[in-house]
Amino acid sequence: MTPTVPARNTGLGSWPARRAAMSPGSNALVFRGDAVTYAQLFDRVTRLAARLRSGGVQRGDRVAYLGPNHPAFVETMFATHLLGAIFVPLNFRLAAPEVDYMLRHSGTVALVHAPTSAFSVRPGTVVEVGDAYEEWLAAAGEPEPLDVAVGMDDPAFILYTSGTTGRPKGAVLTHANVFWNCSNLLVGVDVASDEMTLIGAPLFHVAALNQCLLPTFLKGGCSVLMPSWDVDEALELIPRYGITWMFGVAAMFAGLAQSPRWPGADLSSLRSVMSGGAAVPESLILAYQERGLTFCQGYGMTETAPGATFLEARESRTHVGSAGLPVFFAGVRCVRPDLTDAPAGETGEVLVRGPNVTPGYWNDAEATRDAFTADGWFRSGDLARVDAAGHLYVVDRLKDMYISGGENVYPAEVESVIFEHPAVAEAAVVGVSDPVWGEVGRAFVVPMPGAALDGDELRGFLVPRLAKYKIPVHVDVVPALPRTGSGKVRKDELRRLPGEHEAGHGRGEGGT
């Protein structure tokens, strides 16, 4: 099929035609050893759009995808945008009632899903990925080129937040939000046309989608899709395809560094790795730098599409632990509770403003109103400090901070120090009630394979490294930490777990 660039579609839906015209024979995707060229992807996207339109999908309708990473995700996304509809990527790890809520809330009219997906709400069009999906595409024949009017300010995505507290909100991202985010990313990262990008994080998460897949697509590189993250598979794919760039959350990079295959792994093709989603312990960053790898990290959130700050490669060694400077086309501030700017070194809430910032939440005027200051800055709910040179250091979530004996404690700081213990693979700290101090810390730690970990010994390890009021009074050794689909620790679940603190124990050896 000869690519015809839509004249009236200035959004993401025109990208497959534009890229197919420029590099038709180059690989766009690789999945389980099978490659899809840009020309083939354009053909499949056009066929899928025709089938969705024949099923009643119109401009402004919502089309959802539910399932692990797969080429069908990419096809459904671009086909949706070709029709001027809104794409709703769903977390396939959720239970059916959670997915049903999102389908109802978004008003989804068509759903493409993996065979094992859990849901009970059935929109007007439902297609299962596999033979039925392929037959459905083939039935489209040779569809006529589509040219639906789509503007840059039209909604492109509804991305549901992790929902760590209460019902998830549907953050709306426009085509312009995504374009400016990609522009910011390409300013900060030297993405090349020969890029081989490994995508092991879930594509329903904004970082894998907008920080990896779409910038790689813009440059004409190739994205190697993993259905789900697997350390051994990643270590095999990197040399097999000459992976040059990859994104991951801290837990993914920690898993690689803790693998027994890590010391001898062939990582020679990697130009850089990039992390986000949560604070990354400095010890983990150093583990990658010791392998000669450039470890970049940034800060952002779903509502900022997601990049708000970024630490470029040239600064990754001199500013270890920093989330970098504001991205090129955005403003970032740290403010006090009265919304005045916090001076350098003082912790404040992060505010963001720019063309990458969401216009608001789907069908939620109250949440939209509460998310912005009167002069249009988005309130992140995250705490950070800025140094004299303007580099951002994320401290913690505002809601995760707790106060012990009148002192603010930021769990992310405590977790970073706990992570330095050689027997600790993962750590999470929450504040729990205490009759004397108001709140004290409770740490949940996952031991390294084969390692023994004792709470008293761990607290002793922390004594010379942290102020006494920051040292967790309670330590739970657990096999794993509960996580959201995007890899963030579900601290709401940890706070609900019963423990010895409920018996009224004081701060004890770890106290002031």
Image (cartoon, helix red, strand yellow):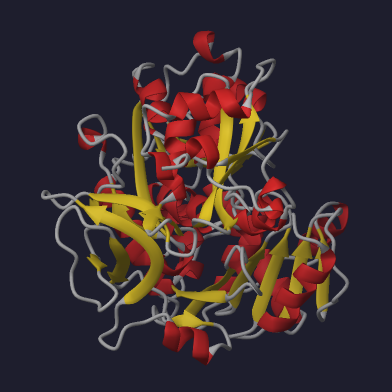
Residue 21 or residue 391, whichever sits in front: 391
Question: Is residue 154 among the parts visible in the rendering?
Answer: no
Splitting the image into 4 quarters, where does residue 113 fall?
bottom right
Is 429 positioned to the left or the right of 386 in the image? right
Instruction: Out of 429 and 143, give the one closest to the viewer.
Output: 429
| Residue 221 vertical position relative to residue 71 in the rendered view, above or below | above
- Residue positioned 54% across, 15% down in the render: 262
Q: Residue furthest left?
A: 388
Q: Residue at x 26, y 47 (%)?
A: 324
Where in the figure is residue 502, as x and y percent of width and height?
70, 54
Q: Quadrant of the N terminus?
A: bottom right
Most distant residue in the bottom direction: 365
| In the image: residue 189, left or right of residue 207 | left
- Nearest the viewer among 277 and 478 is 478
Q: Where residue 411 sits: x, y (%)?
A: 46, 48
In this orientation, does residue 152 appear?
yes
Query: In which quadrant is the C terminus drawn?
Result: top left
